[in-house]
Image: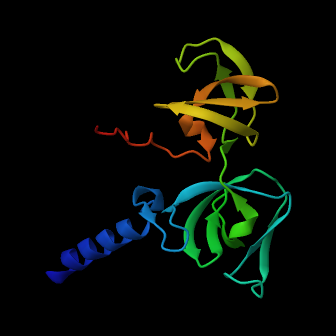
Amino acid sequence: MKRAPLVLAILLALSAGAGADPAAEPRVSRFSGKPVPRFETLRWAEVNGRTGPSLSSPIAWQYNRKGLPVMVVKESGEWYRVRDPVGDEVWVHMRMLAEGSTAMVTRTTVLGASPARDAAGVAEIGKGVLVQVNSCDGAACEVETAGYRGWMPRANLWGVSSAPPAPSGTKG
């Protein structure tokens, strides 16, 4: 019975690693030379998501929303395994994706005139709306949609990294 706590501790440690967010450990893909995971967008209005990385694999999903952000979580040659905003994962051919700066609003949010929390409201943007991301500054991103421009919390957007990128200062 002395081994039970040790076995339990090992199982807990293994399960914690299995559920880790892939965004926490970015790496550079040997196929594309780009970091994985990363966000890209659907290039076309109809994109097939397959169960495996080939045209002979069955279609699991057909996405019908050009510009929808997806997270590339794995690459295999010209095929990318992507996670959609709902959390489902499928394989898509690299030609179906584009680098982009769109994000999807994850909860109804008031767009602010500035990044300050107490900024005047510009518009209310509903859950599921696609927005163009112009820039992010700390915990807020400047976005545009339907003729409105303003700031919303980064946490309310699917399609931008959850944390600001590390400074990339140059030495001269």
Looking at the picture, does residue 46 appear above or below residue 80?
above
Q: Quadrant of the N terminus?
A: bottom left
Horizontal side of 103 relative to 161 (left or right) equals right
Locate residue 15, reporting x and y percent.
Answer: 38, 71
- Quadrant of residue 150 in the image? top right
Q: Residue at x 49, y 69 (%)?
A: 29
Q: Residue furthest front?
A: 172
Q: Residue at x 79, y 78 (%)?
A: 59
Looking at the picture, does residue 117 appear above or below residue 33?
above
Q: Residue furthest left?
A: 2
Horizontal side of 7 relative to 118 (left or right) equals left
Colour mapping: rainbow
Q: Quadrant of the C terminus?
A: top left
Residue 1 seen: no
Horizontal side of 88 relative to 163 (left or right) equals right
Locate residue 65, reporting x and y percent.
Answer: 82, 54
Looking at the picture, does residue 81 appear above or below residue 53?
above
> Camera-side residue: 67 or 16?
67
Q: Residue furthest bottom?
A: 56
* Total numbered badges shown on the rendered structure: 0
Q: Residue at x 71, y 61 (%)?
A: 97
Residue 38 seen: yes
> Camera-side residue: 73 or 11?
73
Q: Residue at x 54, y 57 (%)?
A: 38
Locate residue 53, reporting x and y percent.
Answer: 67, 81
- Quadrant of residue 3 in the image? bottom left
Locate residue 94, reporting x and y percent.
Answer: 68, 69
- Quadrant of residue 98 in the image? bottom right
